[in-house]
Image: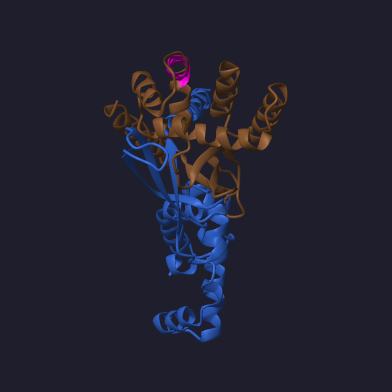
Chain colours: A blue, B brown
Amino acid sequence: MCADSFPSGAAESQRLADRTSGTLDVSHAEARQLIAALHVLSRYVLFHNLTSPEQILAIFPENFHSSLKNLITKVLLEHSPTWRSYAIANQISLPRLVEIDWRVDMKTASDSVNRMAVPTCLVHMKVQDSPCVGGSDPPSSVTVELSRETLDTMLDGLGRIRDQLSAVAGK
Amino acid sequence: MYFSLTEILFQFLLEPKETERFLRQVNEFAGENGMSAGPLRNLVKSMLLVPHGALKKSLTAVQVKEDLLTLGLNEDKALHFSNQWSVHYPVLSRLAIGQTLMVNQLVDMEWKFGVTVGTSEIQKLGNIFLQLKLVIRKGNTTENVYMELTLPQFYNFLHEMERAKASMECFS
């Protein structure tokens, strides 16, 4: 139930409320209240990154049922890593690079030169909008052609990024 | 007189975008040597067919000289032209290859990377992100493509590009 109440639309979900009221044998209104509360609680734990049992137990009011408190805390701690990865994967961002393929061709002739041997590289990149932006847009793709010089320049640039990243990570 | 005409011709071949300058030089040449500009322009246009054909067939200087002799040019002039040809050939052939069709050519790449400090879901975060802007030539205009990569995606991208480069080097 904790896991089900985490996603954003959970508080409004009719189906979830029905299921909950059936499982726990409570009224529909009480079920919705419970789901909304669990939703807020799980989001709170995620936002403040509460990772120890003591931190979570501290949120509950003093007269809260003890074993229920411990159970809920345990469940929240179990799900936190999954929720954290999910939130990070779904945060707003520029379109994400999803997949990359490449191919190296050898140009052997053109309208201006009858015979040549010029290698060229084609790179195909699949990008997808962040899930929270366009919903479930299909990924768009872009194919680029790079000459040898362009590829060398690009690798220079990427190498510099890598060096700067290691410098930052080293600090 | 022939030498300066050859020079004008080669200047144009080396910088094919300078059509105005080329026509101006041809007209000046006509004026200086007492010829009418119109027929000279036509003559020069036909003369250009020789180097264009030679580039297409990747002819050597010797072959160019033979062709010119066959066309009726005298020995000295053919020799001068073929000497100029061997001097300028590397640049000319690179220009011809450079004119070859490229589809969605990557023209420029810009990047920035930084750290995501927090989001509306998670108050404190410390993830590194990389943003790339690729400038792609589509016909006469350019198009910008923006994308974001996580750190593992960046390393994968770098790895793939290094493999592509290794593959290209195999061919030379």
Q: Nearer the viewer, residue A22 or B46?
A: B46
Determine the image quadrant of residue B100.
top left
Please name whichever residue, A38 or B149, is drawn nearer the observer in this view of the structure: B149
Residue at 54% over, 67% down: A8
The stretch in magenta equals: B78-88
Q: Is residue B15 magenta?
A: no
**Measured from the top left, where is residue A58 in percent x and y?**
56, 52
Say if A142 sits above or below A9 in the image.
above
x and y percentages locating residue B57 in the rendered image: 35, 33
Residue at image coords 57%, 52%: A47
* Magenta highlight on residue B79: yes
Residue B8, placed above or below residue B98: above
In the rendered view of the protein, which quadrant contains the C terminus of chain B? top left
Residue A33 visible in the displayed image: yes
Foreground of the two, A6 or B110: B110
Q: Is residue B25 left or right of residue B151?
A: right
The relative height of residue A117 versus residue A141 in the rendered view (above or below) is above
